[in-house]
Amino acid sequence: PLPAPSFLAMHPTLAVLYAVTETETSELVAFDVSDDVPSEIGRIGSGGSFACHVAIAADGTQAYVAHYGTGEVSSIGLDGDGAPASLLSAHVDAESALGPRADRQDGPHAHFTAIDPVTGVLLACDLGTDTVRRYLPGPDGLEFDGIAVTLPAGSGPRHLVCAGDLIYVACELSN
């Protein structure tokens, strides 16, 4: 019974399922799913509002959350059992110009994160600024590393897929 769970992700090696709540004060919630009935093992504020995506680092030490409402991309440390332990960092793209769609691009709107398997950087789609941001993961969280790509104004990047040395971006506003 979670308020507005918007995205789920599995831990890479443990029987732990993560959900983010798309609420004013969003949370990352972890469940042990090794039994027939899942049991909550921890929750933590995710560092922004209206979380809409979560990705788990390949080594299982951090969760990366995209917040549509306030635009942050945050990093949450996970303990050895997969439970959320601490909010490590939260970044918002306040420097990029907003897109031309006032009804949907009134501010930064981080929508999705993915770890590039070639470079190891975290990529984040921002629907509000028509950009894909780049972050360097580290033990203390994420360090902003610039804009990976600026898409045409009004594109509204929503999701991406890394395929070798190519990145495919699906845009919500320009289709």
Image: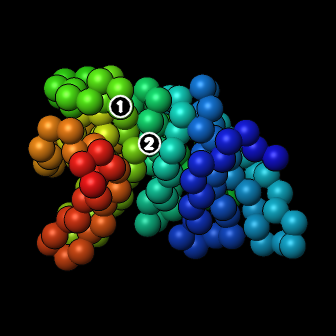
Q: Quadrant of the C terminus?
A: bottom left
Question: Is residue 120 in view?
Answer: no
What is the crowding at mark 2: few (fewer than 14 residues within 10 Å), some, or many (at least 20)?
many
Q: Residue at x 26, y 68 (%)?
A: 162
Report the side of 129 relative to 72 (left or right).
left
* Rendered position, 120 above or below 14: above
Q: Nearer the viewer, residue 165 or 50?
A: 50
Q: Nearer the viewer, residue 83 or 126?
A: 126
Q: Indicate the position of residue 131 as horizontal and vertical percent values.
A: 20, 42
Q: Which residue is mark 2?
A: 66
Q: Residue at x 59, y 65 (%)?
A: 10
Q: Residue at x 21, y 31 (%)?
A: 99
Earlier residue among tags 1 and 2: 2
Report the side of 32 relative to 118 (left or right).
right
- The mark found on residue 104 in the picture is 1
Q: Indicate the position of residue 31 as horizontal and vertical percent values.
A: 73, 57
The CA span between labels 1 and 2 is 16 Å
The answer to the question of whether label 1 and label 2 lie on touching residues, with beta carbons closer than 8 A, is no
Per the image, label 1 sits on a secondary structure element best described as loop
